[in-house]
Image (cartoon, rainbow, N blue to C red):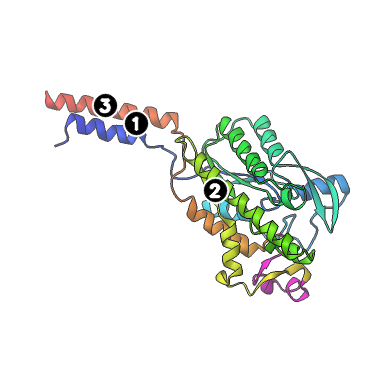
Amino acid sequence: MLTASGLASLLGSVLATPVSAASFSQIYAFGDSLVDTGNAFALSQSELGIGIPPEPYFEGRFSNGLVFNEYLATDLGIPETSFGFGGASTGSLGALRFGGMTLLEVPGLLAQVDQFVATAPSVDPDALYVLWAGFNDYFFEGVTDPFVPVGNLTSAVNTLSGAGAKNFLIGNLPDLGEVPLAGILGLPPEVVAGLNLVSNAHNQILADTVAGLDASDSLSVDLLDANSLIRAAIAGEFGFSNVSDPCTLTPSCLSNPTAQSSFLFWDQVHPTTRAYRIVADTALAQISHNPVSTPEPTAVIGLSLVAAFAARRFQRSRA
């Protein structure tokens, strides 16, 4: 027989469970070309009269198809909005570069977040906030201290969480010396080794930072370990037959959509859409646990009324 204390304990556990913890409501993405779904294309079209990147890039993405945040949103069945720009740094500014030329300034990660918080009617606590940037800091912005980009990523989390965001997914970096661009530039071995060292330092500092942020009871912060995925693909996992050459510079790949799925890299820097699909699968598995969520007020009131009614009926039955 259920006792009064047992009833109170049961109802208390129900009321303590976040009502909307089963899923995210939407995705907001901030960062560089890895999450850009057409923002740099639209800006360059407006400012320069030509959208960058052009065909055969897919509809303004820096790839041959959708990028990972779009796949992830589809898997979750929720809407996705990206504020990312190709060429963005983790700071306030970046630059859209294409074909070896610097074309125009773009907002960096911090500027994207500040703009979002300043203009959004409210910050959805049940959304997933994706942050992925850092490559441009090291390759093009002259940054050598990994604490700077990681500090910017942390500041972005703090700004968003201060406005009400609770759930975060933060991407790390591949080994910078192993992307095709390093080989195309003909970088000497010591420079390649230095790039790998700085990206490894970045990833370690970021992992420690994410662990510290996730320790907060009010936040859920996950690390998207893209570095391990790229390493695994280069080592032969996932079935890519070419893990070193850009598809855009390989005529037999560029002209053959079937062959494109066998390439890890679409261009000198960016993954193919199939690689993004793998990243999204990994992210989906990572965030399958319940997010930090805010109970709906109406649901809490309803449960409170049920609890009060049940308690009263219990007391009457005892009498």
Query: Residue 107 appears in which quarter of the rendering?
Result: top right
- Gap in angstroms between the C-alphas marked 1 and 2: 39 Å
| 265 relative to 90, above or below | below
Q: Dot 1: what SS?
A: helix
Residue at the image point whose x is 74% and y is 63% from the top? 182
Q: Amino acid at mark 1?
A: Leu
Query: Residue 255 appears in which quarter of the rendering?
Result: bottom right
Say if the magenta span includes residue 212. Answer: no
Query: Which residues are drawn in magenta?
Result: 250-269
Residue at the image point whose x is 68% and y is 61% from the top? 193
Measured as percent of width and height from the top left, residue 62 is found at 73, 57
- Gap in angstroms between the C-alphas marked 1 and 3: 10 Å
Residue 207: numbered disc: 2
Q: Amino acid at mark 2?
A: Ala
- Gap in angstroms between the C-alphas marked 3 and 2: 48 Å
Residue 309: numbered disc: 3
| 296 relative to 269, above or below | above
Neighbour tally class for label 1: few under 14, some 14-19, many 20 plus, Cα within 10 Å = some
Marks 1 and 2: which is nearer the front? 2
**Foreground residue among 81 and 253:** 253
